[in-house]
Amino acid sequence: MKLITAIIQPQKLDEVREELIKSEIYRITVSRCTGRGQAETIDLYRGQEVAPDLQPKVRLDIACNDEWVDVAVQAILRAARHGEGEVGDGKIFITPLEECIRIRTDERGGKAI
Amino acid sequence: MSRTLWAISFILVFCTLAFPQPVQASDGVTIDTGTTAWMLTSTALVLLMVPGLAMFYGGLVRTKNVLGTMMHSFAAMAIIGVLWVVCGYAMCFGKSFGWMGWDWQYFFLNGIDHGEGARYSIEVNGHAMVIPTLVFAMFQGKFAIITPALIAGAFAERVRFRGYCIFIALWSLLVYNPLAHWVWGGGFLTGKAIDFAGGTVIHISAGMAGLVTALYLGSRRGYPQTAMHPNNLVMTLMGAGLLWVGWFGFNAGSSVASGFQTAQALTVTQTAAAAGALTWILIEGIHLRKATSLGLVSGILAGLVAITPAAGDVQPYGAVILGAVAACCCYCAIQVKNKLSYDDSLDVFGIHGIAGIVGAIGLSFLLRDVPEHGVASQLWYQVQGVVVSIVYAAIVTLVLVVIVEKLFRFRMEQANEMAGMDHSLHGEHGYGLLNLN
């Protein structure tokens, strides 16, 4: 079992979600976060251009069985990329998932994902 | 000694303030300060409705579009605020040339700033008195401001700012000004169709314009499958409160008096809003088993829009009926919209259009004073007013939308629409507190 953590641009959330659903991955946790990578965006404030140090991003957490990891990653890569790829598209981290428990039934392991 | 002086001063001041004195203008025509004070207040109340509308609509769109949506209302204040003074008042209330009015005296409001033109005649208890024409002109100007801001709800979340500004400037000149001229300014519907505060001129025309524009520009990307939830219903409710209170200026101020008709208009405005809200939550309670806050405020709006053409001409029982019927019709209209899946994003036609039609037609049966020509004739005049508004607004708006789309591009590019109006169009973020620094 793996936990896929993807940090993407907020405007790509709809497309990524649609692409994951097309690949039959429905269960997901989405949160709004702030972060900093290589990218810089410009905001305007009273005649000045400002580059905020931390920018809004969206974080996806998907727990899945090993067979599904590639499917999920490919779906995210297809949808979260701007065109051929732009600075700021985001990152995906894959971490091993030690245990997964369904609260309702106390099932554990791959069945509970 | 000083206490006596204080007492005398107090009594003198009290006498001056407690009994409003008509002001003698230099050639002997008296200004009714009571009416002037009320009209000044109404003007401010109606302007307050525009930020109220900004909050109402702003809270209903997705977070990434909150500023862009509020900008639509604020930009209307800026653009129409200038246009009205330059030529809007002249086009609406100038001498009639059929389609438009015009009077060079009203250009930049020059002729009504002082002198003969600055006096607007009203009748107070059988006496001829005046209020400053500027007050009347600015009061009317607030109506011109809010109408295009209403339309913006129909194409929320998907238009460019520059295209929007050009669109509302043209719309105000070519749709609102002629309609206002026909109904209030001496054009062919003046004196026939009853439209006390702008049910046809404002709400039906905005509703139709919204519908036409929403259909032409197409749905938001992902509509109706993607969830598009309100980002701040708290702000929407506050906006609705401001709209309700501001509407007292809208309706009661349209009496251009401070007397019995004003009081009647205020009473029915309150009653219709409350009846609309009550009806809507009852319907939701039965249909959905939960009354929603958005439903309650939608009911408020439906009631207020319905009473707008009728505010000076129906009694409280009529207001209850109009408010309740409008809420029912609007609720059904929204269900129909959901079935047909067109994207009138904030239900501009569903609420303003439909309730305006309900009010304009329904008032024929609820008049306090049935006119000499009878209810049937009045109904015919009402239908004329409604049909003229619908047809004219729809056709001219369609022409304008096509022009703006082709020449200046109205609809946003898809990438910008997905990123959100706030950042793409304005380089800002609505809620900085969502960012952790």
Image (cartoon, coloured by chain):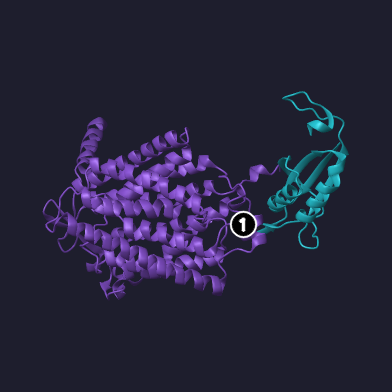
Chain colours: A cyan, B purple
**Which chain hosts label 1?**
B
Name which residue lies at 47% across and 52% down.
B337
Q: Nearer the viewer, residue B86 or B184?
A: B184
What x and y, as percent, mark residue B286?
Answer: 42, 34
Q: Residue furthest top?
A: A106
Name which residue lies at 81% across and 47% down.
A72
Residue A79 left/right relative to B260 = right
Q: Can see residue A44?
A: no
Residue B416 left/right relative to B164 = right
The correct choice, above or below, for A45 with respect to B190 in the image is above
According to the image, label 1 marks what residue?
A: B221
Q: Amino acid at mark 1?
A: Arg
What x and y, as percent, mark residue B113?
Answer: 30, 65
Q: Can see residue B345?
A: yes
The correct choice, above or below, for B90 with respect to A87 in the image is below
Name which residue lies at 25% across and 73% down.
B95
Check the picture and name the quadrant holding the C terminus of chain B: top right
Q: Give the total of numbered labels.
A: 1
Quarter of the view holding residue B280: top left
Residue B190 left/right relative to B353 = left
What x and y, as percent, mark residue B96?
Answer: 26, 73
Look at the numbered disc 1 and give the secondary structure of its residue: loop
Check the picture and name the quadrant holding the N terminus of chain B: top left
What x and y, as percent, mark residue B195?
Answer: 27, 57
Quarter of the view holding residue B318: top left
Q: Crowding at label 1, few (<14), some or many (≥20) Cα neighbours within 10 Å?
A: some
Name which residue lies at 13% across and 59% down.
B373
